[in-house]
Structure formats: structure tokens, C-alpha cells
Image: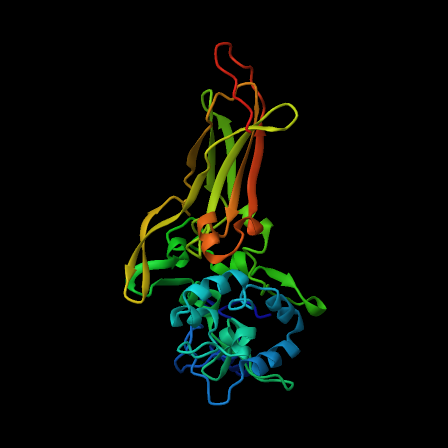
Amino acid sequence: MGRWRRTASGERRTPRVAGAAVVALAALLFAPAAGVRGDPLPPLPGPAPQGRPQGFSARIENQRCEACHEDIAAEWRASLHRQAFTDRVFQRSYAIEPLPFCRGCHAPEADPAHHPGADAQAVGVGCVTCHLVAGEVVSARGRDARGGAHAVRGDARLSTDEGCARCHQFDFPRAPGVPMQDTVAEHRPGRFAERPCRDCHMQLVQGIAGRSHRDHRFSVVGDPAVLRSAIHASASRSGANAIEVSARVVAAGHAVPTGDMFRRIEVRASAVDAEGAIVAAAAPVILERRFSVRPVEGGIERVPAGDTRLPASGAPRVLRLVFPAVIDGLAVRWEVVYQRMGAAMGAAFGVDPAADEVVLAAGTLGARPLIIGRPAPAPVP
């Protein structure tokens, strides 16, 4: 390692370094990173059309990815991306509104002007949808071709919110400027704005041979632990016939729930006797995006009419649940429940919302002495 040297005048100068070493160092510092080029970047992943060449088979090309990246492929096959078109709830909704707009995101490897073929349905949002763009294999980190492996073009945007935005931030098709999904916009002003989507939804995991990679299950709806970690809730009594539940976002960079506009949270409570039998139930409180519906040519249009979800800011919502009678002398069980949709929408789509419920938080408030003069509630018939 070189040392500082001092001239006869006492001036300090940098150490002598061989000319060849200087050239080599400069080459390392200023050479482009592997897979990075100076020409314009390809488009980011997004809805159809993908501009695939004639004869392109999403299924066959996807299988080529799966053959080499076995661990990542196994994660993807268990993901909602893979089930984007075949998911039973989407299929019920699609049967009511089979629109090109829906097919663009849920079957991006097909022509949205037509019902997707079997290959596009099976792939859903596949490896090729995000990583084969404009004829090039792309990833957040690039590499040159070596050892028989293909080159990967580096596009750092894939590690940012931009990589998700084209499918997870969009407006109603008949109402430009009115967000149908607003997740990315919710994230930008939030407490975790500096953390990209992948930090929570594609965490680092150990794969084959101990190599780490980003988890491609994109777990949210299918992972109750992730859902539960997003909020905190507590409860207290409020008067003789009510309780208050305070809930807030603690570990999510967006409103909760977010994404699909029918997702919601139901807060409910029941008063129980010493044997645990339900004596009275409070009217539930719903946290959701609300819409009014109006008929338009060719169908209906939903217009935003309110938003009671838990905000990304972490500000608490204090919710009062009122019972039909005095509940002194009774314990109260309360819970905060995530639902993909409510009962009315479930009936319209022919699905049972209770099948997908996830309890995010729950507790029991102990009985307090019954005050003389207040009538005890009658048991629920």
C-alpha cells in the first residue's frame, strides 16, 4: 500500500502508483456495470399488450425460466400473480364484467381484445411478464452472458415502486383521474415512502445452495401473518352499552386494506355470559372505500363516495361499537377482521366472503359489575 511522501519543501504528496495500476483502477471505476447499456431502457412491466412476436408462447417461454430458476419458480407458482386469471373470486367478477380492461392486467400475455387462450390463462402474470420485455431478459441487477447463461439487462427501476405501478396504480376505465387502485399513490407521502414495495412484499429469502433472492410469492392476501403485522388495535369500554376500538397502521406503507376496491375491514363485538354464550351483539363498523353506482352505456360506473380505511399515516381511527342494551356484568369479545368483500358483493359474485376472512386483531374485555337500576340484556334468541 502506498505511503504519503514529503518533498524537500515539506509539501505532502500522494504516493507513487504504477501507471498500469492507475489505468486498471480507472477501468474499474468508470466501466459500465454488467448488463447496463447507454441506450434507452425497455418499457416497465405492465398490462397487455406486451408486443410479443408472432408465434410467441408465454407458456413455453415461461417454462424455460422455471427450468433454471427452480426455487423462484416454485414460489411464483404459489402466488396470486400465477393465479391472476384463474383465481375463483376474479373469475366470478369477470363473469359479470368480461372487459378488455380486466384482461389487460389479469391475462397480460394475451390480446386484451379477446378472451385469453389456455396458455395465457395458465401463466397469469408470469416470469416473462416482468422479466422478458422488448425481447430482452431484464432484472434489477444486470449481468453479462457467461458459462452458457444468458445476459440480463439491468434496470434499477424494477427495484423501485415504478416496477409495480403500471399494474397496481390505475384509474377507472371510464373516469380518468379517478383511481380504481391507488396503492402506489398512498405509499408516496407515507411514513415508509423511502422503502420500495419489494421490501415488504418481496423479502430476501434463502434459495438453492444458500443463495439469497427476492421472494416471488408476493405474499399478502394469502399470508395471514403479513396481514396481521400491518395494524395494531386495542379496545376499551365506553359507557354502559358500548366499547371503543382504536386501530392504526403500524407496518404498512399504504392504507389498510389497499388494492382491490372491495377489500374491507369489519370490526365486530359480542357480549358473552360466564359460560361464553353470546348474549348481545354490537352493530359492526366497516372500514372500506365506498362507491355509488350509476348506469352508463354498456354497463355501470362506480363513483367514489367515501373512504374509512386505516390511513397510511398511522393516524388511529377510534370506532364506537354500540350494543342494543346495557352490557355491564358481561365480558365483551371484539375482533378486527380482514375481508376480500362484504356479504352483498359476495352474493353478487356467488362467493362466500367468510371463507377468506383473516382476524387481524382480537381480545376480550372482562365483565364489570352490573350497576343496580340498569336492566340486564336479554339473551339473543
**What is the quadrant of the C terminus in the image?**
top right
Report the side of 27 relative to 308 (left or right). Answer: right
Seen from the viewer's position, the closer of residues 217 and 7 is 217
Residue at (58% x, 65% y) in the render: 216
Measured along the vertical axis of the image, is residue 224 above or below residue 232?
Answer: below
Point out the image quarter for the N terminus: bottom right
Residue shown at 70% from the left, 66% from the top: 210
Residue toward you, 375 or 193: 375
The quadrant holding residue 20 is: bottom right
Kindly give the residue lying farthest to the top in the view shown: 372
Task: Please give the name of the residue rendered at 62% of the width and 69% of the height, measured from the top-left corner.
Answer: 72
In this picture, is 217 found above or below 26?
Answer: above
Lateral position of residue 363 relative to residue 70, left or right:
left
What residue occupies the far right of the structure in this picture? 209
Residue 43 on image: x %, y %: 41, 76
Classify residue 143 by image quadrant: bottom right
